[in-house]
Image (cartoon, helix red, strand yellow):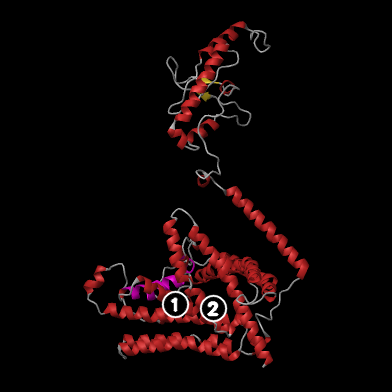
Amino acid sequence: MSISNSPENLDQKPNIRNESEDRSFSVRRRTNSNVVNAVPDSCSKVGTIETVTKFSSVDSAAEMSSGEDRNRIGNGDDRKEEANSLSNGQVYNERVGIGEGRSPEAEVPFRFSYRASAPAHRRVKESPLSSDAIFRQSHAGLFNLCILVLVAVNGRLIIENLMKYGLLIRAGFWFSSKSLRDWPLLMCCLSLPIFPLGAFTVEKSAKHKFIPEPVVMSLHVLICTASLLYPIFVILRCGSAVLFGIALMLLASIVWLKLVSYAHTNCDMRALAKLTDKVASKSSDMDYSYDVSFESLAYFMVAPTLCYQASYPRSTCIRKGWVIRQLVKLVIFTGVMGFIVEQYINPIVQHSQHPLKGNLLYAIERVLKLSVPTLYVWLCMFYCFFHLWLNILAELLRFGDREFYKDWWNAKTVEEYWRMWNMPVHKWMVRHIYFPCLRNGLPREVTLVIVFFLSAIFHELCIGVPCHIFKFWAFIGIMFQVPLVLITNYLQNKFRSSMVGNMVFWFFFSILGQPMSVLLYYHDVMNRKENGVSK
C-alpha cells in the first residue's frame, strides 16, 4: 500500500523518511516485564506486521509462564501504562525501551503505540471481586450505595408507618402525671450529695488519724451501701414511671461507683504514704502526695469519669459554639429515639406475645421485627450519652481525657467489646476489681466471672427496680456473656483473618439479645399492671 497518494503527504521526501523511521522501530520489551511497548505503523510491510505478531505471541506465552506476573495483581506498571493515555485532547508520547543504537531520548507518538495489532492482554490479572483481590480494592462506592439504600428503605418505612398509624407519640408510658405530683424521686436525687460529703468527712478524719483504718473502711462500706439502697427503697415505695426510675438508678449507680473509687484510692494513697522515700523515688512518674481536698472531690463527682485522682488533665478553654452545636445534636437524636420507640417499638411489643410462651415461629418473627428499631435506639443512645453528653460535660469542666469509648463496632470478640464500648466503667473495673483480684492470687478466669457478676447485678438493679420486676432477665443476659467470651475467643483463634467473632457479637447483641430483653420486660410489666388493677 503506497502512502504517496495520501493528501496529508504531498512531499515525497518526508514520506520516505517517516517510512524508513517506522521500519527502524523494533518491538522491545520493558525492563522486568514481557510487555510490547510499540507497534509499527500500518505503513510497514507485511513482514514487519508478522514480526510484531510473532513477538506478541512470544511475549504472551512468556507472560503466562511467568510466576511472578501470575501472582502479581495490578502493580505499578498498570498505572504507568494508564498514564500514557489521552487527557484533555492532548497527545502524550510513550517512551520505548532502549536498544542498541537507540538514544535514551527516543520516543514514539501515541498513535503508533496503540494500534489494532498491539496486544490488549499483557499479564495475568484477577477480577476485582475475586477472593484474592477483593480486600485489596476500595469499596467506598459500594459503601455510599448502602447508605443511600438504607436511607431510601427507612424513609419509605417511616412514610408508610405514618400513613398507616399516624403520629403515635405519647408520654404516658414514660412520664406519668403521678410522677410529676409525687416528688420523692426528685428529692432523693437532690439528696444524693449527702453521701459524698460523708465520705469526705471520713477521709478527713482518717488523714488526721482521728479514727483507725478498720473503722474508716467500715464507714466507707456503710456509706456506699446506703447510697445505693436509699434510691431503691424510694423507687419501690413510690411506683414512679419507668424512665424516671431508670434515670435515678443510673445516677445512684454512678454515685456508688465514684464513692468506691474515692475510698479505694485514698486507702491506697494512705498505704503509699507510709512507705519509704525509696519506694516513691522508684516511681517518680507517679504522684504519691496524700491530700484530702473538698475541691478535688467536688470536681470528681461531676466530672465524666468514675476513677478518682487528685488532678486530671485539663483543656485550655471552653468552646461555647461547639457546646451549642452538641446540645442541638443531643436534642435532635433524643427526639429520634423517642420517635422510634413510640412509632415502632411500642406497636410491635403491644401486638406480641411472651417470647417464652405460645408459638415459637411467631416469637421468632416478633424478635426479628423488633431487632432493627431496638438497634437504632441503642445506637442513638450510645451516641447521645457517650459521645454528645459526656463530651459536653467534659468541655464545660475542661476535662482533658475524653476517650469515653473506642471502636467497639470492630470488636472481634465479646471480651473486646466490653473493653471498648464503655471506657469509664472499663477503667473502673480494671482499677478497682480486676487487678486487685489478680494481686490477691485469684485466677484470671475467676476474676473475669467476678467482673461480669458485678456488672450483672447493676444491670438488674437499673432495669428490674424501675420496672418493679425481679425476674433476673438482665442478670442472666449479662452472665451469659461469660460463655460468649469463650466462644468468640475460640472463633477468633480459629479464624484469625476473619470477622466471625464480630458477626457473632452483632448477632447476639442486636438480633437476639436486645429484642428478647425488651419483649420479656414489657410483658412482665404489663402482667404486673394487669394483676395490680385486678386486685
Q: For the residue marked with disc 2, what is the amino acid? A: Trp
Dot 1: few (<14), some (14–19), or many (≥20) neighbours within 10 Å? some
Residue visible at 52% across and 82% down? 461
Q: Is residue 420 magenta?
A: yes
* Residue 473, numbered label: 2
Question: Viewed as shown, does residue 173 lie left or right of 389?
Answer: right
Residues shaded magenta: 418-438
Q: Are marks 1 and 2 in contact (CB under 8 Å)?
A: no
Asked whether residue 390 appears in the rendered view, the answer is yes
| Helix, strand or loop for the magenta stretch, by majority | helix
Of discs 1 and 2, which sits in the foreground?
2
Relative to 529, residue 97 above or below: above
Q: From the image, which quarter does the N terminus lie in?
A: top right
**Callout 1: SS:** helix
Q: From the image, which quarter does the C terminus lie in?
A: bottom right
Q: For the residue marked with disc 1, what is the amino acid? A: Phe
Relative to 132, residue 313 above or below: below
Relative to 316, residue 89 above or below: above
Residue identifier under label 1: 453
- Find residue 375 and report its horizontal and vertical position in percent: 60, 66
- Find residue 69 and report its horizontal and vertical position in percent: 46, 33
Asked whether residue 307 appears in the rendered view, the answer is no
Question: Which residue occupies the foreground of this view, 67 or 98?
Answer: 67
Relative to 133, residue 14 above or below: above
Quadrant of res 2: top right
Q: Is residue 310 magenta?
A: no
Question: Viewed as shown, does residue 343 lie left or right of 491?
Answer: right
For marks 1 and 2 on the same chain, the one whose residue lies earlier in the sequence? 1
